[in-house]
Amino acid sequence: MEIEEVLKWTDDQVFVKTGKHLDSLQKCILEEVWQGAKYPEIAEKCNRSEDHIKQVARKLWKLLSELLGEDVKKSNARSILESKAVSSIYNFGNSSQIVNSKINRSNINICGEKKQPLDDAQQRSHSPPDAPQSQNPSPIVDLTDAPELTNFYDRTSELSTLKEWILQARTRLITIYGLSGIGKSSIALKLIEEIQTEFDYIIWRSLSNPTTLSALQTELKQFFARSQQNPLPALIDYLRCDRCLVILDDVQNIFKSGQLAGQYLAEYDDYSKFFKQIATSSHQSCVILLSWEKPREVATLEAENRSTRTLHLKGLGEQAAEILREKGLTDEDNWSELIALYQGHPCWLKIIASTIQDLFNGSVSLFLAEQNEIFLGDLEHILESQLERLSESEKKVSYWLASQAEAVDISQPGDRELSKSEFWQIIQSLARRGLVEKVQMGARSHFHINPIFKAYIQSKLNHLTEKQL
Ligand SMILES: Nc1ncnc2c1ncn2[C@@H]1O[C@H](COP(=O)(O)OP(=O)(O)OP(=O)(O)O)[C@@H](O)[C@H]1O
Ligand SMILES: [Mg+2]
C-alpha cells in the first residue's frame, strides 16, 4: 500500500475523531517513519529540532493509539497503520455471501459476493429490524469534499434530534436547511463524529459546482463498491446492502435563482426523483441534504410521512458567547444583547466580532452604545447573495414585510397587489428559505421577516430614497 493512501486514510480518521486534519509536521513525521527514518533524520527532513520532533511525535502516537485502539509507537506505527488502513479500505480476504434478509424481502441476493466479510455490516444486515445495531469500529470515510470543523459549540438539542431520526427512527432522507453561515456543514460534521461507527460507509459530496445526477451516482457507486466483488446494478442496491451515510452539501446550487424556493434547474431536475427514491425505497442508509432552501418534494414527502425529516437550523442561542470569547471581546454583561441582536448566527457574530475588535478595541458596550440602527457592515454582501436568489414576487413581499412594524396576520387582506393564494405561496417559499418565520399569537399564526434582513432591506430603501432626492 502506498504512503499517500495510508496518510489520507489516517487523516480522515483523525479528522472524524478530532475535527482537525493532520498538520504538515505530523504528515512529515509519518512519511519519514514510513521510510524507516530515525528521529535525527526526521528532524533534518522536517526542518525542526530533534527535541521538537520527539515532542510532536509523542503526542501523535498518543492520538493514534486512542484512535486505533492499539499502542502505536515509532517502531510499529507503519505496520499498525498499514494493516488498519488495508482492512478498512480494501476488505481483502475470504469472500462470503450476504443475503440482506431484512431489506430484500424477496430473498434475492442483490448484495452478492463481498470481498471480505464486513462483520458488523453483516450482523446489521441479518438482524431483525428492532434488534440493537452493532457498531462498526472502522467505517470507510471520505470527507475530502467537507469543510474543516473548527471550534464547535452546543447544538445539543439539534444533535440529539438528528441522532434520534437516524438511529432510532431510521429516517432515510433528512434535510437541514437554513441561512448561509448558520452552521449546517458544521453540525453535519459534528454528527458524523458522533455516529460514525453506526455506518459502514460515510461520504460527503458538495454540490457547490453541481455535477449531473448520473455522475454523482457513478461516483457514489464506485465508493460503495469497495466491499463488493461484483458491481451491483444501481446505487440503491448499495444503500440496501450496507449502512451508508451520504451528505450532500450546498444543495441550493441545483435550484433555480429568481424562482420560488426549491425549484430544480432543468439539467438537475432528475435529482427530484432521486430524493424521492431515497425516501420511499426500502434500504438501510441515510442521505442528508444541506441547503439554503428546502427542496420542493421534501415538503410533500414529509407531509406523507415517507421516512423524511427536515430540520430548520436557527441560531446558537446563549452558547454563541463562546464565539465572542474566542474572538477576545470584552464587557461580558452585554454579550446576550449582542447575541440576540444577531440572532446567535455564528457566522454573523464572527464577522461583527471582528468589526468590534477593529473599531472598538473589543468593547461590546461601546459598540452597542453607538447603534441607532443595526450595524451590518461586512454582512451586507452575504445578505445580498441570498436576497438576489428571490423571485420578483418574493422580493416584493419581503420589502413589504420589512416595512411592517409587527409580524403580520396573513389571513388579513392588507394593501397587497397579490391574490391571497399567491401571497400564501410566497410566504411559504420565503419560510422554506428561512427568511420568514412564524410566531404564534393565540390561535393565529403571524409571520415576520428575519430582523437582520429587515434592517438590510430598510437600509437599501433608504439609500434609494436618498439617491432620488
Ligand atoms: N456550533 C458552532 N459553534 C461554533 N462555530 C460554529 C458553529 N456552527 C457554525 N460555526 C461557524 O460558523 C461559520 C459558518 O458555519 P457553516 O459553514 O457550518 O455554515 P453553513 O450553514 O454550512 O453555511 P453555508 O450555507 O454558507 O455553507 C463557520 O465559521 C463555523 O465554524
Ligand atoms: Mg455549508
Image: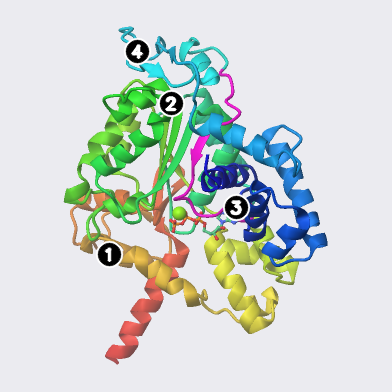
Q: Nearer the viewer, mark 4 or mark 1?
A: 4
Image quadrant, ligand 2: bottom left
Report which quarter residue 343 is drawn in: bottom right
Numbered range of the magenta stretch: 133-152
Q: CA distance from mark 1 to mark 3?
A: 42 Å
Q: Is residue 364 magenta?
A: no
Residue holding disc 4: 104
Sequence-earlier tag: 3 or 2: 3
Sequence-earlier tag: 4 or 1: 4
- Assign a secondary structure to mark 1: helix
Sequence-earlier tag: 2 or 4: 4
* Residue type, label 2: Ser
Question: Which residue does the image show at 35% across and 56% down from the upper left?
Answer: 208
Mark 4 burial class by Cα count in 10 Å: few <14, some 14-19, many 20+: some
Report which quarter residue 163 is drawn in: top right
Sequence-earlier tag: 1 or 2: 2
* Residue type, label 4: Asn
Q: Position of residue 232 (x, y in %)?
A: 30, 24
* Residue type, label 3: His
Mark 3 burial class by Cα count in 10 Å: few <14, some 14-19, many 20+: some
> As drawn, which residue projects farthest toward the right?
51
Residue holding disc 1: 395
Q: Position of residue 303 (x, y in %)?
A: 33, 31
Residue holding disc 3: 21
Residue holding disc 2: 227
* Residue type, label 1: Lys
Q: CA distance from mark 4 to mark 3?
A: 39 Å
